[in-house]
Image (cartoon, rainbow, N blue to C red):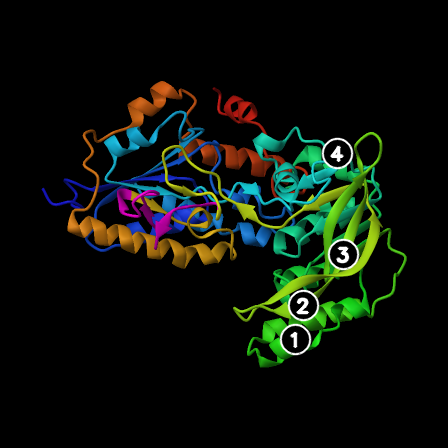
Amino acid sequence: MALGTVENPLSVAVIGSGPAAFYAVEHLFKQPGLAVSIDMFDRLPTPYGLVRGGVAPDHQKIKTVTKVFERIATNPRFRFFGNVEFGKHVTLADLRQHYHQILFATGAQTDRRMGIPGEDLKGSYPATEFVAWYNGHPDFRNCQFDLSQERVAVVGVGNVAIDVARILSLSPDELARTDIADYALDALRKSRVKEVYLLGRRGPAQAAFTNPEIKELGELADADVLALPEEVELDPLSHAEVEASDDPALKRKVEILQSYAQCQPTGKSRKLFVRFLVSPVELIGNPSGHVVKMRLVRNVLYKTEAGTLSPKPTDQFEELPVGLMFRSVGYRGVALPGVPFNERWGVIMNEQGRVLDSETGERVVGEYATGWIKRGPSGVIGTNKPDSVETVNMMLEDAAKGAVLQPDSANIENLVRERQPHCCSFGEWLKLDQIEVANGKALGRPRVKFTSVEEMLKALGR
C-alpha cells in the first residue's frame, strides 16, 4: 500500500512543541496529496516552547504567533501528548516501532559558560535560569535571585541579555501589565536594583541585539539608559565594516547606541549602562562566597583570517562592583538519549536536518532535527520557518524513496497513557489557556500563568 495515502498515512513523531516544531508540522500538512498523521510530544503540559517560556513578558505582540500554531493543531490528523518526557515515558525505540519518521525539535535548553574564575560564586547565574524563572517555567519557579543587590551585570549583548536588563529595569507598574509569573512580579516589586550594566566584548557594530530591542531601552518609564562616548565610537575597522555594509539597520543600530552616549541622567530611580569592548576575566567574592565585584579587561578589535572582527584583550583592567551577575553568552542544546550529538557545538549531528550516525557519518533512517537543536541558537522565531521547511523537504524526499522506518504498530496512545496517566491533550491545554487568560483579565493582565504541573493538573480536574 502506497505510503502517504489515506489508507496508509505517513506517521511522524515530533519531539518538542516550540516554533520549529509547529512550522515543520505546518509544512507537512500543506503538502498536496499527502496524508500524514502527526503526534507531538512535550515534557510540559503546555506547548509553544520558548514562545511561552522565553519571550519576554512585556513582548505580547511576539506571542501572538501562537494563534498560528493553534490553528495548525486543529487538524484532525494532529495529536498533542503533553506532560510526556522523551527518554522517560517514551523512548527512541518506542518511537521507531510506531512511526515512519521522528523529528527532534527540542531547542537549546541550557547555557554556555564564560570559563572564568569565580563563575560559580553565589550571585552568579545563567540568564537562561532567570528568564525561565520570570516566565513561570515549572522547572525554575523555585529559583532564588538576590534582588536586594543594588548593582547587577548582564554579560552579553544579544536579545536575551537585553531582555534580562530590561526586566530588571522596568517599574512595578510596567511589569504589572505583563504576563510575568506572579512570584516574579512580587520579587521584582521589592527589588533594590539601582544600576544595571550590559556588557559586550566587541563594539556597538557587532552587537547581536535587534534595533527594536535596543530602542526600547530608551523608552523605560523609570530608568535612564547611558553609554560611554569612547565605547560607542567606532574604531577604524568597525567604521569600515559599517560603511561597506548595505544594511541600513546596522547603521541605525550604531546611531541609536551613540545617541545614548549623549544622554544625561534625568533623575529616574534606575540607570542602565550599555558598555562595549570589555570582557569579564574574573568574578571576585567575599568571605561567604558571594560575588561582590567583577574584573574586566578592555578589548580592541582585530580582523580574523575569516574576515570577521574579533576582540583581543589589552593590558587595561578595571573592577566593577556588582552583587549579582547574569551570563548570556549563548544557549546550547542538550543531548537526547540515543540520538547522535555533537558536544562541541551543542546540536544533534545532522546534514540539512537528516540525523547522522556519530561514528560512520551515515544518515540515520527516519530521524531528523530542526530548530536550535539542529543549527544552534541563532535567529529569531521566524528564522525557524525556513529551517523547518528545509528539514521537512528532506523528510518528504526520503519518504518518496521509501527510506523510512517500518513501524509495527499504528497507535502509541495506549502505551503513552499506561506509562504517563497524566498525559495532557491539546484540548486540555486550550482549557488551561482559557483559565489563564480569564484570571489575567480580572487583573488587567494578558494572563496569569500556571507555574507548576500540579496546578495545571488540578485545574483540569486530575
Q: Residue at x 69, y 64 (%)?
A: 215
| Earlier sequence position, callout 4 versus callout 1 | 4
Q: How many marks?
A: 4
The residue tagged 1 is 237
Mark 2 secondary-structure assignment: strand
The residue tagged 4 is 122
Image coordinates of residue 184 in percent, x first then y, are: 70, 36
Residue type beneath disc 4: Lys
Q: What stretch is highlighted in magenta?
A: 346-366
Residue type beneath disc 1: Leu
- Kindly check if marks 2 and 1 are in contact, taking CB atoms under 8 A apart as contact: yes
Q: Which of 242 and 219 is in front in this view?
A: 242
| Earlier sequence position, callout 2 versus callout 4 | 4
Q: Which of the 4 quarters of the picture holds residue 212?
A: bottom right
- Kindly check if marks 1 and 3 are in contact, taking CB atoms under 8 A apart as contact: no
The residue tagged 2 is 301
Q: Which of 381 and 293 is in front in this view?
A: 293
The residue tagged 3 is 297
Answer left or right for 420 relative to 243: left
Q: Is residue 350 magenta?
A: yes
Mark 1 secondary-structure assignment: helix
| Earlier sequence position, callout 1 versus callout 3 | 1
Q: Distance between the residues labelled 1 and 3?
A: 20 Å
| Earlier sequence position, callout 2 versus callout 1 | 1
Residue type beneath disc 3: Val
